[in-house]
Image (spheres, rainbow, N blue to C red):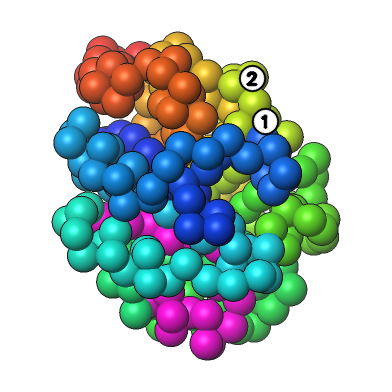
Amino acid sequence: MSSQFTIFPAVDIQYGRAVQLEKGISETQKVFGDPVEMAERWKQEGAQWLHLVDLDAAFGRGSNADAISQIVSHSGLKVELTGGIRDDESLERALGTGCERINIGTAAVENPGWCDEVLATYTDRIAIALDVRGDRLATRGWTSTDGDLWTIIKRLNRAECRRLVVTDTESDGTLTGANISLLEQVSQRTDAALVASGGVASIDDIRALAKLAPRVEGVIVGTALYLGKFTFAEALEATQVSTTDGN
C-alpha cells in the first residue's frame, strides 16, 4: 500500500442537492447547493478524489446517476461512488457513470455470494463499505441493522477484498471526533486498505488518522469542510506533515 494519505471530500446527493446528514438520518439534512458546483469547489481547492453518495439510491427512492455522470465527466476528479449498489442492474448503472471506484455496503450483508463475485471480477475497483453500528452493520441507507462486523470481515478476507471504507455511523455528521479505536480494531483483523469516515471535526482528527497510514490510506470528510472547521488546504497540509514526521 502507498504511504500517501488521501482526503476525500464528500458530496452527498439527495433530491438533486448536495447535503450533509447527521448519523445518516434523511430529515437532518443541511443543504449546501448544487453538487456539480460542490465538486468544482473541491477540485479548485486541490482535491484529487471525491466521495459521492447517492442518498436517494441508498434509501430506495430513485437515482442521481445522471448528475453523478456529469460530475465525473466535468470535474476530471477520481470518484468513489456509493449508495444503493446491490445487484447487477445498479452496479451497471454505477459503472456507467465513469466513476473510478464503487463502494458496496448493504449487499455485502444481504447478498454475500453476489458481492464475492463482484470482488473477484472488478478487484481494485470495488471497496466494501462497513457502516458500523456497535458490532453490527447499518444497511438500507442505515435504516436497518444486520450482520456481525467481525464475521463479515473474515468472509471478506477470504474473498480477497482489497479495500474497506469504515464508517462510524453514530458519529457521522456529528463533529464528535474520529473513531480511532474502531479503525485500529478493524486493521488488526484484515490486510485490506482502510478508508476512514465519520465524526471528523478538526485538524487534530486528520493528523491522528494520517498517523495510521499506510494501514489507513485516507479519510472521507464532509460536514467539517462544509461548515469551515478547517479548509481542504489545511487538511492536506496536516496529512503531509503527519505521514512524514516519523510518528
| Quarter in which the C terminus is drawn | top left
| Image height of 55 relative to 117, above or below | above
Mark 1 secondary-structure assignment? loop
Q: Find disc 2 in the rendering and name its residue.
A: 176
The residue under the point 58% across, 35% down is 30
Residue 104 is marked as: none
Q: Position of residue 143 (x, y in %)?
A: 79, 56
Foreground of the two, 235 or 179: 235
Foreground of the two, 13 or 214: 13
Quadrant of residue 80 in the image? bottom left
Q: Amino acid at mark 1?
A: Ser
Residue 171 is marked as: 1
Q: Is residue 45 visible?
A: yes
Q: Is residue 94 magenta?
A: yes
Task: Give the Cα distance between marks 2 and 1.
Answer: 6 Å
Q: Which residues are magenta?
A: 78-95
